[in-house]
Every structure is written in C-alpha cells, then in structure tokens.
Amino acid sequence: MTTSVISGKYVLGMRDGEQAVLQDHYVYVDGTRIEAVTRDAPAAGTPVVRYEHGFVMPGFVNLHAHCIRGGLFRGIPDDLEIQPYVPKLVYNVLLPLTALAAKELTPAELRAVTALGMVDLLKGGTTTVLDMWHHGQDVFFDVAREIGLRTVGAPFIMSSSNSRLGPDGYPVWDFGNDGMAQLAKSIALFKARDEGRDGLAQVAIGPHATDTCLPALLRECRRTADDLGCILTTHFAQTPQELSLLRTRYGMGAAEYARDTGLLGERVVLAHAGCATDEELAVLAGTGTHVANCAFSFAREGQNFPYARFAKAGVRTGIGTDSHGMDIIGELRVTGLLSKQLYGQAHVGTAHQLMRAGTLAGANALGRPDLGRLQAGAKADILVFDLFKPHLQPVWDPVKNLIWKGHGGDIAFSMVHGEPVVRDGKLLKADEGAIMRVAAAAARKIWSIGEGRGILPAPAAMQ
Ligand SMILES: [Zn+2]
C-alpha cells in the first residue's frame, strides 16, 4: 500500500540498468521500499511531497568515513606543515588524539561527537555510510538509529593498538594478541546488532590496515567475514611508507600481500589504494575488489588520488569522505576536478560518472542492489534537491548542476528507510543545536589536553 509519493521536476531513475534523468515522474513509497517510479499521478488523497523545481534522486552511499573523528579533528590536519605528511600526521597526531578521546570523553560527549558526524553526513546527502570506528564506541548504532542514518559499521581490528612512529620514519607496533580479542568483539557485535538488509544497521569486519595487522589476523578476518557473509573493509596502499614496510617485512608488493592475506574479492572494500601501481590496480580490477576513493583527504596533503585513475583501470570504484568532513558532493567535485587535472582532459571524471560512483557503485560494493537507485523494490532512501536557487538555475542537466554547483544546503527533503529525516533544511529526528554545542565542547576538551601534552600546537588564530 502506498504510504507516500515524492515528486519533482526531475527524477534520477533507472532505464535498462542505467541511471537516467526522467521528467515529471512520481516515486511511490510503500513502507520502507520504493513501490514504483512512474508518470502516473497518484489518486486524490494520497500524501504527496512535491517540489516544483525538485531533483529527486537516490541517497548517496558513502563508502568510507570515520564520522566520530570528523568533528574531533576538524581543522587540525588542514595546512599542517608535517613532512612526510601522512605517517607523521596519523601516528603522531591523529591516533594519539583518538586514544585521548577514547579515554577522556564521557558517554554523553561521545554520543554528541558521533551524532555531529552523522548529522553532517545526512545533511550533506549521505543516506548510507560504511564507517570505521574503535571498539568501545559502539554507541554508534544507537545514535544512527536515533538520527535515521543507514549504516554499515566496521570497528577497527588491529594487531596492536599501541602504534607510534619510529626514528626512521616507519611506524612501530608493539604487536600482541589485541587483534584476535578485537575480532571476537566484532563477531559479538555482528550477532547483536546486524539487522540484515531489512534493517537500518549492518556490521562489517574492519581490520585497520595492511601495516597495523599481522598476516594471520588478516587471514582470520577474511575467514570470519566469509563465515558471517559480511563485507570486509580495510585501509590499503595509503602511503609509500606502508608499501616499503610490506616489502621489507614480507618481501611482497601491496597487491601480492593483499592476495596472500585474503584482502581481494567482490566482498572487499579497500579504502584509498592511492599508492597502488597500475599493475596492482589491474589485480584489483581482475578480482572484482572495490575501492573507496577519498581524494579530498589526500589532496589536502598534496597527493593526487583521483577517481578516474581507478575507473580507467577498470576498478569498481565508490566514493568516501574519510574524516576531513562529511560533504559527499564536495568530495565528488574534488575527485572529478583532480581527475581532469591528472589527464588534462575535461571528459574524464564527468558529473554522470561521479553520480554513479556516489550511488550505484557504493551500493554494489556493499552487496546492496536495493540501495543507490530509484526503482521498484529498492529501499526508500531518497533525496530531493531544490534547484530553484541562483547557483543552480537555469537547468540544462540537473546532474551536472548538482555535482559541479550544488551542496548539501540545497537538500529540501530527504528520506531514509521510508522515513523523512530532513525537511526544508531542518533535521527532523534530533536537536541539531544541542548536538553541536555538546560535541564542540567535547572536542575542545580533547584539544586542550592534546595541547598540554604536546600532541597539538596551539592554533595560531587563537593566540
Ligand atoms: Zn580511513
């Protein structure tokens, strides 16, 4: 039975398995699912959400994020003079700050910080996120349910939580048995919280990275993911240091190591893969392994890992925001522009390719043919952008307007799992102001402890 109908001037529907812009169509919703996408007008009395200049499209699927870190680290990694950038930033600043947060945040503060990242995601257009956080922060699923965000949660599993950067610039770990205990926690979490496709929450297996997990742990993670029938996700080929560490420690390249430890295949999502060689990308493509491209995070460090490099190699490529912010349209725009820069061509990294990457490819990577598309039987995860804005008029192609000129502030309405979550810019299921106030105070508390311990410099603007 139809529970609501959504319509706008344009609808991004499906035709012959491909995305297509349809004019003056209606999206019929029945409970949590889409019943039909059709020109047929609804019967009188049916509740209709109608935006005259609306662009109705599927919610974005964000394939790699850390929404708890998003708020905690806001502004910290930007413009920082640390070279070589990534390892020192991660091991000297971000991981110590994360550890501080795990110790010092009260449950209410952790909830608010988590909620802040999720509200940021939702108001940016993400309706499904594959997110990695630390065990002990499992409030994640409760907060997501409260706000109305669809999640696949993959708590970190590491061979050691005790990592630091050694004097030679390589990360050093005190490896112990932490990893197996963390894997056991992930299995317990899966049993307790995974709701399958019919629910809002799923659990994935998330070994942290190729350099923070020992091979035996990675293999056990893969076996577990196969047993549970869930996604496995990890960080892969993020830095040259990681690759040379694999070479030194195991005598293998990144793809070879991934093959050896079970990190390849259609049920695997590798975050980044930016340092993989062309030959290694061919291995990922040949095995159907998915990559979560997060170009913005790396671009701010001066590295160019654009979408088109992976797509051209035939790799199944979705898009994630990582933790610099949760703005998926901004992420698509950055990776599109970097793609054009890399190849010196305007017709790579097109708006339509990026739209598919941000919706269909992300959903496919999660093994969810019922997400990322507007068609009968798919989940009712729906966005309506109001195109009657000075920066979005006139409209020749709504997909181009949205990707190159739009932002989350243009969302007029959004629905997840058949339930409205944002209307006219307002979050419907939680108090956004209260979340921001508590989360900001919590982040400032962590920063000030971090400054006191020499992890963080005092911000120049505040002196
Ligand atoms: Zn990440």
Image (cartoon, rainbow, N blue to C red):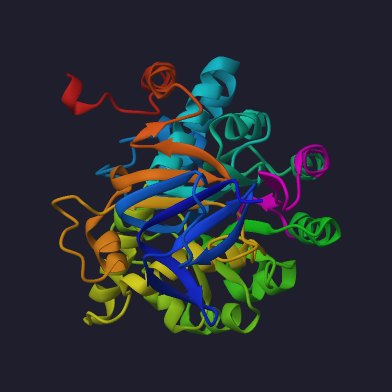
**As drawn, which residue projects farthest toward the front?**
44
| Residue 297 percent across, percent down from the top left | 37, 53
The image quadrant of residue 191 is top right
Apparent side of residue 423 relative to residue 339 in the rendered image (left or right): right
Which residue is at the front of the view, 92 or 187?
A: 187
What's drawn in magenta, residue-wise? 187-215
Say whether residue 214 is magenta.
Answer: yes
Magenta highlight on residue 274: no
Q: Is residue 276 visible?
A: no
Left or right of 454 in this view: 276: right
Residue 43, percent across and down? 52, 54
Count of numbered marks: 0
Q: Is residue 204 above or below residue 358?
A: above
Nearer to me, 257 or 414: 414
Residue 146, image quadrant: top right
In the picture, the quarter occupied by the C terminus is top left
Query: From this viewpoint, is residue 75 visible?
Result: yes
Residue drawn at (55%, 79%) of the image: 17
